Image (spheres, rainbow, N blue to C red):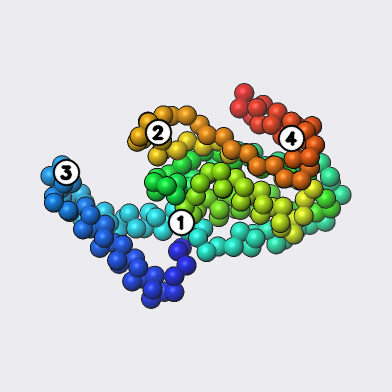
């Protein structure tokens, strides 16, 4: 949830509900188009929705990366096809898709469930896809895992582009490469080829 002290958070929530109620009823522009009974609980539902969308605000992404295990493995570890849903900071509309994360261990590994958890925390806040991709990579590189390299790839559909404006239904791909992945072309080629096989 959004990290307000309980009293301040409650007050802020009520202000937002009231602002939405005034907006929806302004000059009757929406109530003329639909039975007003359908809008009665809408402000509260919208606020609850955004509290869910922004539940990662105030959560420390490093908190899920603290537990690591000793390992002799030095080969690539990849978690494919992690579902993401986030909210575009520019229009407050969702974007959604899939995230692929790989890392090359040095002498430690991390529980596989921690990577989707990291992606979820960073996704559940107002975001820009380019920044989200970078944040996932940087948090893994800067964690106790201390990997030799990290690669992150996100493919997402942005409703701010597909449902308004240009109304284009394209998929946006962003990548972030750190350590070995940025320094050794063969390593990133292996990662990207694996993603292509997944898409085939």
Sequence-first disc among 1 and 4: 1
* Residue 71 visible: no
Residue of label 3: 34
Image quarter (top left, top right, bottom left or bottom right) of the C terminus: top right
Residue 84 coordinates in the image, percent (x, y) = 53, 44
Sequence-first disc among 2 and 4: 2
Residue of label 4: 188
Query: Which residue is at 56% across, 53% downward?
Result: 122
Label 2: few (<14), some or many (≥20) within 10 Å?
some
123 vs 70, nearest the viewer: 123
Q: Helix, strand, or loop for circle 1?
A: loop
Sequence-first disc among 3 and 2: 3
Residue of label 1: 54
Residue 82 coordinates in the image, percent (x, y) = 59, 42
80 vs 149, nearest the viewer: 149
Residue of label 2: 162
Q: Helix, strand, or loop for circle 2?
A: helix
Nearer mark to the viewer, of 3 and 4: 4
How much space separates mark 3 and mark 4, taking CA atoms? Answer: 53 Å
Sequence-first disc among 2 and 1: 1
How much space separates mark 3 and mark 2, taking CA atoms? Answer: 24 Å
Sequence-first disc among 3 and 4: 3
């Amino acid at each position: 949830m959004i990290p307000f002290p309980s009293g301040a958070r409650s007050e802020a929530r009520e202000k937002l509900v009231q602002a939405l109620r005034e907006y929806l009823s302004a000059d009757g522009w929406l109530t003329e188009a639909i039975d007003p009974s359908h809008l009665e609980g809408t402000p509260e539902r919208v606020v609850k929705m955004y509290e869910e969308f922004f539940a990662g605000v105030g959560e420390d992404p490093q908190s899920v990366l603290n537990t690591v295990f000793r390992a002799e493995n030095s080969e690539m570890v990849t978690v494919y096809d992690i579902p993401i849903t986030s909210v575009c900071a520019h229009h407050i509309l969702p974007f959604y898709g899939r995230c692929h994360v790989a890392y090359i261990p040095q002498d430690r590994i991390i529980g596989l469930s921690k990577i989707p958890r990291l992606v979820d925390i960073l996704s559940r806040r107002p975001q820009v896809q380019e920044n989200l991709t970078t944040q996932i990579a940087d948090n893994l590189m800067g964690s106790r895992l201390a990997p030799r390299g990290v690669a992150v790839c996100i493919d997402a559909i942005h409703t701010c582009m597909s449902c308004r404006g240009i109304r284009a239904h394209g998929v946006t791909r962003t990548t972030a490469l750190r350590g070995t992945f940025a320094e050794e072309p063969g390593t990133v080629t292996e990662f990207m080829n694996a993603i292509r096989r997944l898409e085939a």
